[in-house]
Image (cartoon, helix red, strand yellow):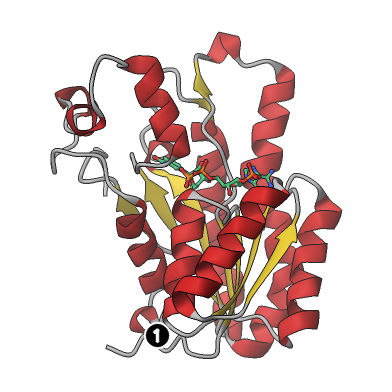
Amino acid sequence: MDLGLKGKVALITGASKGIGLETAMQLASEGARVTICARNIEGLEAAAKRIAKETGAEVLPIQADVTIVEDCKRIVDKTVEHFGKLDILVNNAGTSSAVPFEKVEPELWQYDLDLKLFGAIHCSRSAVPYLKETGGSIVNVTASIAKTPPASSLPTSVSRAAGMALTKAMSKDLGPDNVRVNTVCIGLIRSEQIEKRWRREAPELTWEQYERDPRHQIPLGRIGDTKEAAKVIVFLISDAASYVTGTSINIDGGKSGVL
Ligand SMILES: NC(=O)c1ccc[n+]([C@@H]2O[C@H](COP(=O)([O-])OP(=O)(O)OC[C@H]3O[C@@H](n4cnc5c(N)ncnc54)[C@H](OP(=O)(O)O)[C@@H]3O)[C@@H](O)[C@H]2O)c1
């Protein structure tokens, strides 16, 4: 199936590793040109080289911190300056931060919202005028715990629930301009943050044992991988989802209690 991504220009935040890197890799494999951003320049440049080498695509790495409003504007402006347009924005930058309510200091509330909510808001705000020109698409990467927040899931479940509301409201505003806005709700996908959790929670288990451990309560019986997450993100961006906006897809092996 032709996904209609050839010649498209995509900006993916938090794309030096994990789900963001794999999304950039798959978009580049489909013929898109990609801007990737992250804070750590060494990791970012290594990721850019890897994508270019494996796909032959043009890759623009920009060091940026999406908690800084000016950086959000700069990555969008530089992308358009370099590639001449913008078709796709993936708001992916984020990190895990799930603790009990009483342990969340005011600074952590602020940081989590700055990273996961305001980062997506400010990048989208700068990108929307360009996306209107191309009939583009936004995917916000959120988390399945936004829908059914368990104990000790703060502040992230709150920041992610706000990201879901943002997705729905923006999809209504921007539908008439042919700009689609969707979200994916991640459960457990193997990445650096999940590997750290494995070493902290169960250092006595091998990865193969940990990923299939019943404690995760995943109906499909295992933690997912970044390729599986990226494929769904790419689907939502692509022409295959041309009539899909304002929706969320759980990428969680069936773990969530809600659709
Ligand atoms: N993996 C999971 O099971 C899971 C579950 C629920 C939700 N999620 C969400 O899915 C997204 C991807 O997760 P992942 O597991 O692939 O994460 P990851 O492997 O830890 O990668 C996170 C990426 O975001 C970048 N980043 C972090 N803070 C940033 C900032 N302030 N500005 C710009 N870039 C920043 C990181 O690079 P630098 O550190 O160099 O900036 C890195 O490239 C995140 O939003 C995460 O919260 C993941």
Q: Quadrant of residue 234?
A: bottom left
Q: Quadrant of residue 148?
A: top left
Mark 1: which amino acid? Answer: Asp
Is 204 rendered above or below residue 44?
A: above
Estimate the x, y position of residue 233 in percent, counting from the top left.
41, 64
Residue plotted at (72% across, 19% down) = 106
Is 53 rendered above or below residue 43?
A: below
Q: Give the secondary structure at mark 1.
A: helix
Residues 69 and 13: in front is 13
Question: In this image, 185 relative to 142: left or right?
Answer: left
Q: How many numbered markers are drawn?
A: 1
Residue plotted at (48% across, 89% down) = 6
According to the image, label 1 marks what residue? 239
Estimate the x, y position of residue 56 in percent, counting from the top left.
51, 81
Tell me if I can see residue 231 in this picture: yes
Tell me the quadrant of ligand 1: top right
Tell me if I can see residue 181 in this picture: no
Is 85 rendered above or below residue 16?
A: below
Estimate the x, y position of residue 104 in percent, counting from the top left.
62, 16
Residue plotted at (81% across, 47% down) = 68
Residue plotted at (26% across, 14% down) = 204
Residues 70 and 39: in front is 39
Q: Quadrant of the N terminus?
A: bottom left
